[in-house]
């Protein structure tokens, strides 16, 4: 994120504030069956094997890219590099990443479908 992009930074902070609310985190864990660094949210994990691993993740913070398809992560890496080099702008970065995500969704390859 460019240091001068105050609006983008504010949006990211607002999203992280929202996503870290206990009720939102619980809903995400319940829906996606992923581990959360907010231990109380992990009660929503129902898979018996996954529940056995919960103590291992007690103090871990999972990287955000655990939630994305590999193509999304690769596109994000490429777009951040282009943004830092000045070869693109934030709006174009968002559009490029969204295009990859839409392509994955339309082909049925999405963690969220």
Image (spheres, rainbow, N blue to C red):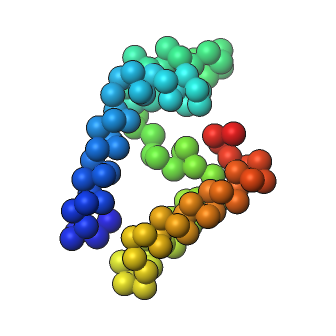
Residue 51 shown left or right of residue 108 in the figure? left
Visible residue check, residue 49: yes
Residue 102 shown left or right of residue 25 in the figure? right
Give how far across and how far down residue 108 sits, in percent: 77, 48
On the rendered image, what quadrant is the C terminus found in? Answer: top right
On the rendered image, what quadrant is the N terminus found in? Answer: bottom left
Q: Residue at x 39, y 30 (%)?
A: 37
Give how far across and how far down residue 55 sits, in percent: 47, 20
Of all residues, the one furthest to the right in this rendering is: 107
Q: Residue at x 21, y 62 (%)?
A: 6
Quadrant of the image occupied by residue 38: top left
Height in image: 96 above or below 88? Answer: above
Height in image: 109 above or below 34? Answer: below
Give how far across and how far down residue 104 sits, in percent: 70, 55
Q: Residue at x 21, y 70 (%)?
A: 4
Q: Nearer the viewer, residue 42 or 91?
A: 91
Give how far across and how far down residue 99 sits, in percent: 61, 64
Visible residue check, residue 52: no
Q: Nearer the viewer, residue 40 or 49?
A: 40
Quadrant of the image occupied by residue 84: bottom left
């Amino acid at each position: 994120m460019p240091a001068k992009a105050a609006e983008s930074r504010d949006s990211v902070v607002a999203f992280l504030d929202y996503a870290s609310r206990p009720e939102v985190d619980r809903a995400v864990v319940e829906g996606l069956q992923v581990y959360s660094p907010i231990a109380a949210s992990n009660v929503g994990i129902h898979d018996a094997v996954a529940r056995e691993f919960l103590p291992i993740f007690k103090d871990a913070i999972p990287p955000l890219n655990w939630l994305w398809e590999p193509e999304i992560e690769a596109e994000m890496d490429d777009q951040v590099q282009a943004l830092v080099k000045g070869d693109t702008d934030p709006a174009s970065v968002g559009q490029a990443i969204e295009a990859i995500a839409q392509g994955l969704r339309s082909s049925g390859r999405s963690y969220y479908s």
